[in-house]
Amino acid sequence: MAAAPVWSVDPRTGKRREQVAVEATAAEVDAAVRAAHDARDALADRRVRAALLRRAADLLDGAGERIVEAADAETALGPGRLTGELGRTTYQLRAFADVVEEGAFLDVRIDHADPALTPPRPDLRRYKIPLGVVAVYAASNFPLAFSVPGGDTASALAAGCPVVVKAHPDHPATSELSAALLRRAAAETGLPAGVIGLVHGFEAGIELVRHPLVAAAGFTGSVRGGRALYDAAAARPHPIPFHGELGSLNPVVVTEAAADERAEEIGRGLAGSMTLGTGQFCVKPGLVLAPQGPAGDRLERSLTEAVSDTEAGVLLDHRMRDAFLDGVRERAALPDVQAPVTPGAGGEHTVSAGFLTVPAARLAEDGGTHDLLLEECFGPVTVLARYTDDAEVGAVLARLPGNLTATLQLGAAECAGEDTGAGASGGGTGTETALGGTGTEAATGGTRADARSGASGGGTGADAGTGVSGGGTGTGASGGGTGAAASANGTGTDGAVAGTATAASANGTGRGARLLAALTPLAGRLLVNGWPTGVAVAPAQHHGGPYPATTSTSTSVGGTAVERWLRPVVHQDTPPALLPPELREDNPLNLPRRVDGRPER
């Protein structure tokens, strides 16, 4: 039987452009993985890895015009957006080269033997080593930054791990072009071509995660697709780490003070964020809690005007377009849901942006009739939930799944840590009532486990690969964990969400601090008076969050993303002549390290 062809398709027309490749067979996946496995020793030298990353960045920049043209033809994201994405991608490659050269990611720690301690301490020397071959599953919505030359690939190579990428079917030509440039960079730095493998096809992706020589996987995509691969990784005879980014609602809370002061600005900013890239960002704000009353009405009018002025756009493929149309239609049909600007079809191949409104009380109900509004809908749409008091805000937040981001829009006094007095509007007294109720009752407002069982079905852009991360199911994993989070932010089983008296008093004062403490367990990145679209590549960045946003606690953006592909090893009483150079007493590689608890270089 002939291998299935892989076509490059123009999303602006739905027509095939060219055949790019054929889907990989099991034997071809095996060959790619074995070639990568054989290339591990070639990546052992950190200087070579840094040179590879920098050369790859140079070659991508040099081919920028061809890359942007190919990516635009397959994604319709536009030359401007793609030129910026290419710049981000090559910056990221060079940043990881800097990480490799500096060496702090190896986390070298030496504790000398001390027989006087009780119990006596042996000589201990710890550092981190590469896991092995990494499988990377490319995203649809970032054909460069989260695809073949993207962050998962760059960080894995930085760690010393060869990579086999499963290309996304929405941009196969761009994937082939990028992979060819990475292989050329490998050849020019004296590395075998096997350090970068590329395979196409759904079945190839399954074979890849099951291959016994694959040591870890990185995924950016849907809840449904990511969870299936996560389960496959866990079901292997030898389970492997699976770092997946699956789906995120990215809630926003607008206080009455913020709406009073700048309703029009917030409305315009929200419109720009939710429609950026035709709503195809994994950090798109998908749920906005805004107050009832005149200030909230002004915000809604501003949002209506700005979204109405947004031109129709093209989604990444027609399957996503169909899913978007079905998703907004189903959501708009729910009781008490209105559409001030109706999202839907803009033309035969386009979609029009819009937004829905609903009373926040509907989202706080335990019955589940409106739980669909608590799931990601991939495309240019958001939900504006109008609340009457902070009790409703707390009840809705308690029902949300994990997210990549959570945003607060605060007034000036709230930003200064002053209590505006609005916190008591939910009834009761003190900081615990700022988000409704007290103790455990405030935290629950509908169980997070129930909310997440609905969310696990995935956002509408599920199969498209909208986003990025993985690790564990159940209430604890879904809600961002219990234990430390719960004890920091409240009391009771679900205190992590809304019983915020302790966190508010420890980390700040006033309503702004209480709201920030309530959002903290829900997301990996918290924003105040900004918008989440746009993820800066920086050492302090964290792009991840509680399940289903990601499947692990790691980040896929920033220097610490390299840690996903490493494991610690300790040498105990190893003779000096047998130690790896990273752990030798004279520090021949000049690595930053901690010796007997003290930092040194």
Image: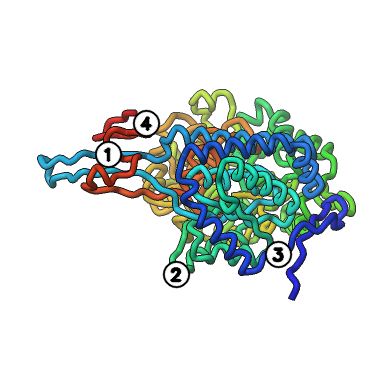
Mark 2 or 3, nearer chain start: 3
Of 99 and 139, nearer the camera is 99
Mark 1 or 4, nearer chain start: 1
Which residue is found at the position 86% from the left and 52% from the top?
349
Q: Nearer the viewer, mark 4 or mark 2?
A: 4
Mark 3 or 1, nearer chain start: 3
Of 4 and 206, nearer the camera is 4
Q: Which residue is mark 2?
A: 237
Disc 1 residue type?
Ile
Q: Quadrant of residue 370?
A: bottom right
Disc 1 from disc 4: Cα separation: 14 Å
Q: Which residue is mark 3?
A: 23
Which residue is found at the position 43% from the left and 39% from the top?
105
Question: Regarding mark 2 in the picture, which secondary structure is present there?
Answer: loop
Residue 156, which numbered label? Answer: none
Q: Which residue is mark 4?
A: 590
Q: Position of residue 225 (x, y in %)?
A: 62, 61
Question: Regarding mark 4 in the picture, which secondary structure is present there?
Answer: loop
Of 572 and 502, nearer the camera is 572
Q: Which residue is mark 1?
A: 110
Which residue is found at the position 43% from the left and 30% from the top?
508
Question: Regarding mark 1 in the picture, which secondary structure is present there?
Answer: strand
Disc 1 from disc 2: Cα separation: 34 Å
Mark 4 or 2, nearer chain start: 2
Disc 2 residue type?
Pro
Q: Quadrant of the C terminus?
A: top left
Marks 4 and 1: in contact by CB < 8 Å?
A: no
Of 547 and 13, nearer the camera is 13
Mark 1 or 2, nearer chain start: 1
Q: Is residue 34 visible?
A: yes
Mark 4 or 3, nearer chain start: 3
